Image: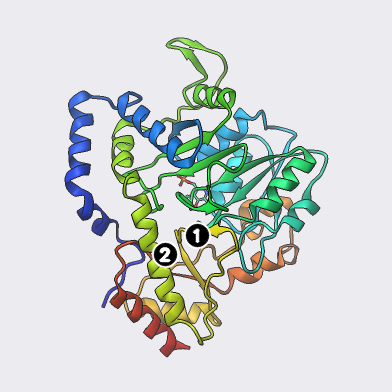
């Protein structure tokens, strides 16, 4: 049996009539950039995140860059982020003109270790960019407290965590501002690129809206140079349809995760920990296994698609050689990068498929 890592076609088939009708409406109205579909989605997504404002942008990376710029963070400033994440988290900090400072992650949570963040703070630090990696909120109590105590913005990179909660509060409503990606494979994915910035701060919302649209204050009046980074009408209309399904899909991901936990109990596979207070949405189901590369290759040979998120910790990438780090500076992220393995997970994943993956893993171990 071939088991894909994600199955976006299966998801489309569940919502095809609604999506096709939504796209047709945008086409017939020619509401391609801005317009009623973008506005409707922005309002719905702000409500979903429990905040006042949502600004649609071109992608999740831009969302972070523009949020940083909106907070006045740029050259001369430092922003701390996680040593284990997708490069976009760090890249966005550099794109804003600030300096990336990495902090190691926890061995159970895979998210920022508050003690390591504290140790990385300097007089130039302006913000902590917290990544809710794999779909689980980071340890927000300690990180928010640290931000408060040291006068730092806490920015959420929620690109992998749409719908996750920390102590009953949705991600997106926890920090000064939060950034989402709607890349197709995310828990809430468009059919192309898309992103959003959400916040309760009305002035910040106005600033990021202006920045994302060429610094525009009116058609040909520009208050500053900005970006061309907008959510388009077709994507917004698709996202509006899909947002109504998100909670159900996240529950289905949790059912799949619980089934994996059960079938992998009493093996050498280290299954994902759930932090107390966190409601995980399993964007990824990441285990740790010995001899990861052998197992990964053997699973692939049997038609089971798996992934590694991420095989090289960010500070160890060539892109960050200029920071002059050694892998031993980030022992947890570096160690985990050699053991982590992402098993197939998506809402439509069947019990049979999960059993097949777990059976194959047990045989290989
Ligand atoms: C996907 C992702 C991003 C970037 O989103 P894009 O829409 O691809 O630019 C940022 N951070 C994390 C953690 C991501 O997984």
Residue 216: image location, x then y, percent: 49, 16
Secondary structure, mark 1, is loop
In the rendered image, the vertical position of residue 22 relative to residue 161, given as above or below: above
Task: Please report contact status of discs 2 and 1: CB closer than 8 Å, yes or no.
Answer: yes
Q: State the count of labels.
A: 2
Taking the image as drawn, is residue 356 in sight?
yes
Residue 352's image quarter? bottom left
Q: In this view, does 85 lie to the left or right of 98?
A: left
Residue 344 seen:
no
Quadrant of the rendering where the N terminus is positioned: bottom left
Q: Mark 1 points at which residue?
A: 280
How many residues crowd mark 2 within 10 Å: few (<14), some (14–19), many (20+)? many
Q: Can you tell me whether the CB of the residue at mark 2 lies under 8 Å from the nearest atom of ligand 1?
A: no
Question: Who comes first in sequence, dot 2 or dot 1?
Answer: 2
Q: What element carries label 2?
A: helix
Q: Percent x, y for residue 135?
A: 49, 57
- In which quarter of the view is residue 278 placed? bottom right
Residue identifier under label 2: 254
């Amino acid at each position: 049996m071939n088991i894909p890592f994600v199955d976006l076609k299966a998801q489309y088939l569940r919502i095809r009539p609604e999506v096709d009708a939504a796209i047709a409406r945008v086409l017939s109205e020619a509401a391609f950039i801005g317009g009623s579909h973008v506005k409707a989605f922005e309002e719905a997504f702000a409500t979903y995140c429990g905040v006042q404002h949502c600004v649609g942008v071109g992608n999740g990376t831009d969302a972070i860059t523009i949020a940083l710029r909106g907070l006045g963070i740029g050259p001369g400033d430092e922003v701390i982020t996680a040593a284990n994440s997708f490069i976009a988290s760090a890249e966005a900090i550099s794109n804003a003109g600030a300096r990336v400072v990495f902090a190691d992650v926890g061995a159970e949570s895979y998210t920022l270790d508050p003690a390591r963040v504290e140790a990385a703070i300097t007089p130039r630090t302006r913000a902590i960019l917290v990544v809710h990696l794999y779909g689980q909120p980071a340890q927000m109590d300690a990180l928010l407290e640290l931000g408060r105590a040291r006068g730092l913005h806490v920015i959420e990179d929620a690109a992998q965590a749409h719908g996750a909660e920390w102590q009953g509060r949705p991600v997106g409503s926890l920090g000064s501002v939060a950034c989402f990606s709607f890349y197709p494979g995310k828990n809430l994915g468009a059919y192309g690129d898309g992103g959003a910035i959400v916040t309760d701060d009305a002035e910040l919302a106005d600033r990021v809206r202006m920045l994302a649209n060429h610094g525009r204050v009116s058609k040909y009046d520009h208050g500053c140079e900005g970006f061309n980074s907008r959510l388009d009408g077709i994507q917004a209309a698709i996202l509006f349809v899909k947002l109504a399904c998100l909670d159900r899909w996240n529950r289905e991901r949790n059912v799949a995760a619980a089934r994996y936990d059960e079938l992998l109990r009493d093996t050498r596979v280290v299954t994902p920990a759930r932090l107390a207070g966190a409601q995980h949405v399993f964007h990824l189901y990441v285990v740790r296994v010995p001899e990861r590369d052998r197992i990964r290759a053997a699973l692939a040979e049997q038609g089971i698609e798996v992934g590694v998120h991420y095989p090289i910790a960010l500070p160890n990438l060539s892109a960050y050689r200029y920071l002059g780090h050694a892998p031993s500076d980030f022992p947890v992220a570096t160690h985990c990068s050699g053991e982590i393995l992402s098993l197939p997970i998506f809402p439509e994943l069947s019990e049979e498929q999960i059993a097949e993956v777990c059976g194959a893993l047990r045989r290989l171990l």
